[in-house]
Image (cartoon, helix red, strand yellow):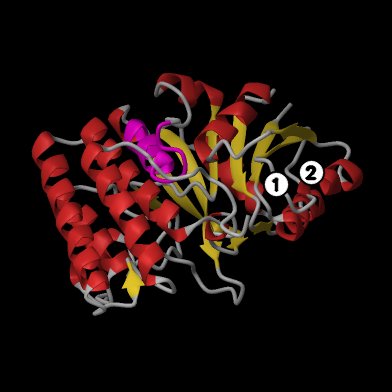
């Protein structure tokens, strides 16, 4: 087996079908396998894959296990040393796999390679490939993502917004949208994804461990992949998502950074959350970390739960279920 492609599926039936079809339209050279881990989809994804792609190895989880655990499940089944982690909301292009494999095999100091991500119109998709977070970048990310303030230099530097990716480019953080690595590398850095980072920052932690082991990450400019952005996570409750982002951020900093950075970011987040809570109570804001507030009473209840979860650093949301269920 030359390559194992691992895909996580959660309620993205049509996109998953398109992704799988694109793989078999533009397959990698040689013998390969596709492993799909379905996180308890309710939209018929599992049945569709069974019927239309019987050659695929398919795992059905009884509940949404999150991104990290599901990919780790897929890795255990993979027969090849070379593995690609691929999101279901992607569309493979003609030489996506070939260019990744060629570059990886010619560069022994590389631990992982990623394609250039494209929007539907063919333009470069930003914000996924970026620098590793430190205290300054983490605060810049929170401001950029959850306030109206967008145009400041620190955020542009963190998100590599001025990078054109016209040539193969070394980066610090590989986006989990599509990563090519090997089982040998995964073993060397202590495993694939940390399951305590269920949805967010698992790829950041993976990238940090690559750097710690002196392994490089590159965007391969001639390997292109269309990405539809957050198709699974957008189905989850926005308060659950924000709690996951916050707790994952604190866990990552506690694990990989110094205590001062972790403590300052935690204080910043608590002040931010409490300020939004007060503004919501006074009727002075209609958004919670950029999520629209449609029910003030319910929002205050969920905001308070997120405040408590942040303070004690323990999840208290109802789980990774569809917000419409």
Residue at the spot of label 2: 46
Tell me: 154 left or right of 88. left
Tell me if mark 1 has few (under 14), some (14-19) or many (20+) residues whose alpha carbon lies within 10 angstroms of its own: many
Q: Which mark is residue 17?
A: none
Q: Going by the picture, which residue comes out furthest to the front?
A: 297
Segment tinted magenta in the rendering: 196-210
Is residue 32 something one can see in this rendering? no
Q: Is residue 199 magenta?
A: yes
- Which type of secondary structure does the marked residue at label 2 adopt? helix
Work out whether mark 1 precedes mark 2 in sequence or the reverse, and give the earlier one. Answer: 1
Tell me if mark 2 has few (under 14), some (14-19) or many (20+) residues whose alpha carbon lies within 10 angstroms of its own: many
Query: Would you place residue 12 above or below residue 188 in this image?
Result: below
Query: Would you identify the image quadrant in which residue 303 lies?
Result: bottom left
Q: Main secondary structure of the magenta part?
A: helix
Residue in the image at 27% along x and 71% along y:
280
Query: Would you place residue 32 above or below residue 118 in this image?
Result: above
Tell me: 96 left or right of 189. right
Query: Would you place residue 211 above or below residue 88 in this image?
Result: above
Q: Position of residue 199 (x, y in %)?
A: 46, 44
Query: Would you place residue 207 above or below residue 25 in this image?
Result: above
Q: Position of residue 65 (x, y in %)?
A: 57, 36
Tell me: 57 left or right of 259. right
User: In which quadrant is the N terminus drawn?
Assistant: top right
Residue in the image at 43% along x and 65% along y:
126
Residue at the spot of label 1: 41
Q: Going by the picture, which residue comes out furthest to the left?
A: 260
Query: Would you identify the image quadrant in which residue 273 lies?
Result: bottom left
Q: Are marks 1 and 2 in contact (CB under 8 Å)?
A: yes
Is residue 204 something one can see in this rendering? yes
Q: Position of residue 124 (x, y in %)?
A: 49, 69
Q: Is residue 17 magenta?
A: no
Q: Position of residue 78 (x, y in %)?
A: 67, 26
């Amino acid at each position: 087996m030359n390559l194992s492609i691992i895909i996580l599926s959660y309620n993205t039936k049509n996109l998953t079908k398109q992704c799988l079809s694109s793989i078999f339209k533009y397959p990698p050279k040689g013998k390969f396998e596709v492993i799909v881990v379905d996180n308890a989809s309710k939209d018929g994804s599992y049945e569709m894959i069974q019927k239309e792609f019987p050659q695929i190895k398919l795992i059905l989880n009884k509940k949404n296990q999150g991104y990290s655990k599901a990919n780790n499940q897929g890795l255990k089944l993979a027969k090849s040393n070379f593995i690609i982690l691929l999101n279901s909301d992607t569309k493979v292009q003609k030489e996506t796999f070939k260019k990744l494999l060629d570059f990886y095999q010619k560069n022994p100091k590389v631990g992982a390679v990623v394609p250039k991500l494209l929007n539907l119109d063919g333009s470069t998709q930003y914000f996924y490939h970026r620098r590793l977070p430190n205290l300054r970048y983490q605060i810049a990310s929170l401001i950029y993502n959850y306030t109206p303030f967008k145009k400041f230099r620190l955020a542009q530097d963190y998100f590599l917004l001025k990078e054109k990716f016209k040539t193969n480019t070394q980066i610090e953080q590989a986006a989990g949208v599509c990563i090519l690595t090997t089982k040998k590398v995964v073993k060397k850095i202590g495993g694939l994804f940390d399951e305590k980072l269920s949805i967010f920052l698992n790829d950041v932690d993976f990238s940090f461990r690559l750097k710690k082991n002196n392994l490089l990450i590159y965007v391969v400019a001639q390997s292109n992949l269309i990405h539809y952005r957050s198709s699974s996570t957008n189905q989850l409750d926005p308060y659950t998502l924000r709690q996951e982002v916050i707790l994952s951020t604190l866990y990552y900093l506690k694990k990989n950074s110094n205590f001062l950075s972790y403590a300052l970011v935690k204080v910043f987040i608590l002040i931010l959350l409490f300020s939004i809570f007060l503004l919501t109570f006074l009727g002075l804001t209609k958004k919670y970390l950029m999520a629209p507030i449609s029910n003030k009473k319910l929002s205050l209840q969920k905001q308070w739960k997120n405040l408590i979860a942040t303070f004690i650093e323990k999840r208290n949301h109802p789980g990774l279920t569809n917000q419409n269920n």
